[in-house]
């Protein structure tokens, strides 16, 4: 089992030993019978500490990113929190991009900063700014990289930033939610840890909220494992099952998401009412070359700005028929959003604010022609 698509179907998913069931059962149990006090049949004692369905997903996630271990959580933010608290301490520093997922900024700013952590926000595409933010870094410093970013699809050079981060002694973390492990492999580019909102492409069907951390280092893996057990933000057996089921088709879905997004992006360039299209698959995107180097293809997310400004952007976002107006992303169905009042409402007035003429698309796996036609009719309204 060497190729990604094969591993996505089989890693951690052996047929059930007892019955031969090709799909391992969902272990909906809180506790496990002991044959004598402390004598567990398969090492499982209580499901916060361990559950076979969650273990199957974790084995799969670690395999797909080439990590030593992975841990799955109740949400992407729960995963991020566990990783950050496993590593940070009061006095530590987090350096993050000025366009990271708003919830990540809020988590550090409102949960970890009051605990004594410093937060430094920089433009991740500006190497000098990142170097400056890492200067005099405390012993525990995290360089938090997200690429592509939300919603402007900026691209950060993972290998370059990993080198910069390591030179300053920082832990380099990549939020790989937008790309998924099929399109981008941060650990192989030098990162120390990867986080996911598995709610998005890994789950892939908009039917489960979850998160994961994948680690390259055993000691940090143990610290995250302890917090998963000790703080308890685990994913449920059913959520772990849904996520595992989604991952089996990740490779084919991402191919289709990328092809559809490319077609949609190209159809929007120069379309009436469209000012700019932000998609790394377009040759004139400022991150195109780095994206081409570090990603298998360019993914399913794109944004556009409307020449009619905020009013036109809102009208457009409310005028599609195939694209559903909703938050979130990464599912098989196409979604449209107005970031400044939806996903990014919480960061208005901060350095993470998103321009109000931007509309974000999560391009699904429907027929590309239908998607292009839907956006055309919405633009004419
Ligand atoms: C959605 C998202 C998160 C947060 O994940 P939840 O599952 O909603 O907690 C983190 N990072 C990115 C890039 C996301 O899109």
Image: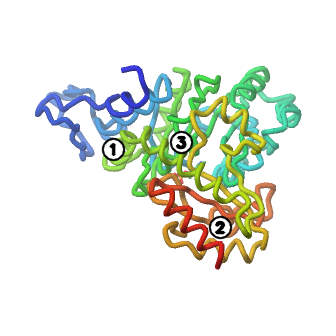
Disc 2 crowd rating (10 Å Cα; few below 14, some 14-19, many 20+) is many
Q: Mark 2 = which residue?
A: 338
Q: Are marks 2 and 1 in contact (CB under 8 Å)?
A: no
Q: Which of pointers 2 and 3 indicates the residue nearer the eye?
A: 2
Which of disc 1 and disc 3 is earlier in sequence?
Answer: 3
**Disc sitting over residue 329 in the figure:** none
Disc 3 crowd rating (10 Å Cα; few below 14, some 14-19, many 20+) is many
Taking the spot 53% from the left edge, 42% from the top edge, the residue there is 196
Q: Is residue 155 left or right of residue 243?
A: right
Q: Mark 3 = which residue?
A: 196
Taking the spot 22% from the left edge, 28% from the top edge, the residue there is 40
Disc 1 crowd rating (10 Å Cα; few below 14, some 14-19, many 20+) is some
Q: Is residue 342 left or right of residue 200?
A: right
**Element assignment for label 3:** strand
Where residue 200 appears, as percent x and y from the top left, is 50, 50
Q: Is residue 87 left or right of residue 207?
A: right
Within 8 Å of ligand 1, the CB of disc 3? yes
Which of disc 3 and disc 2 is earlier in sequence?
Answer: 3
- Callout count: 3
Q: Which of pointers 3 and 1 indicates the residue nearer the eye?
A: 1
Report the quarter where the N terminus lies. top left
> Looking at the image, which is closer to me, 293 or 337?
293
CA distance separating discs 2 and 3: 23 Å
Q: Mark 1 = which residue?
A: 245
Report the quarter where the C terminus lies. bottom right
> Looking at the image, which is closer to me, 72 or 319?
319
Quarter of image, res 19? top left
Taking the spot 60% from the left edge, 59% from the top edge, the residue there is 361
CA distance separating discs 3 and 1: 16 Å
Where residue 149 appears, as percent x and y from the top left, is 68, 47
């Amino acid at each position: 089992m060497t190729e990604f698509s094969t591993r996505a179907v089989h890693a951690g998913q052996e047929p059930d030993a007892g019955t031969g069931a090709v799909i391992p059962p969902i272990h909906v149990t809180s506790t496990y019978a002991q044959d004598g006090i402390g004598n567990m049949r398969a090492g499982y004692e209580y499901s916060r500490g361990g559950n076979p369905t969650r273990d199957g997903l974790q084995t799969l996630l670690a395999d797909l990113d080439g990590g030593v271990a992975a841990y799955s959580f109740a949400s992407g933010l729960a995963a991020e929190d566990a990783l950050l608290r496993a590593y940070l301490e009061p006095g530590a520093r987090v350096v993050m991009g000025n366009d990271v997922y708003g919830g990540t900024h809020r988590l550090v700013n409102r949960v970890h900063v009051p605990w004594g952590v410093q937060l430094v926000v920089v433009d991740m595409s500006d190497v000098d700014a990142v170097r400056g933010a890492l200067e005099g870094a405390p012993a525990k410093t995290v360089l938090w990289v997200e690429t592509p970013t939300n919603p402007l699809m900026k691209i950060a050079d993972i290998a370059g930033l990993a080198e910069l981060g390591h030179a300053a002694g920082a832990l380099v973390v990549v939020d790989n939610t937008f790309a998924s492990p099929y399109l981008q492999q941060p650990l192989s580019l030098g990162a120390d840890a990867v986080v996911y909102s598995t709610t998005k492409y890994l789950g892939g069907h908009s039917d489960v909220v979850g998160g994961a951390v994948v680690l390259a280092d055993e000691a940090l893996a143990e610290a995250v494992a302890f917090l998963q057990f000790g703080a308890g933000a685990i994913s449920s057996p059913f959520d772990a099952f849904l996520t595992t089921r989604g991952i089996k088709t990740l490779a084919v879905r991402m191919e289709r998401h990328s092809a559809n997004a490319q077609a949609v992006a190209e159809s929007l360039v120069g379309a009436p009412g469209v000012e700019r299209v932000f998609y790394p698959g377009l040759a004139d995107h400022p991150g195109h070359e780095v994206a081409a180097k570090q990603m298998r293809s360019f993914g399913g997310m794109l944004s556009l700005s409307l020449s009619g400004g905020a009013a036109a952007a809102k009208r457009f976002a409310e005028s599609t028929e195939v694209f559903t107006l909703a938050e979130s992303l990464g599912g098989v169905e196409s979604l449209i959003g107005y970031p400044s009042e939806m996903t990014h409402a919480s960061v208005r007035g901060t350095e993470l604010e998103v321009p109000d003429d931007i509309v974000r698309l999560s391009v699904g796996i429907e027929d590309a022609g239908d998607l292009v036609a839907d956006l055309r009719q919405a633009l004419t309204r």
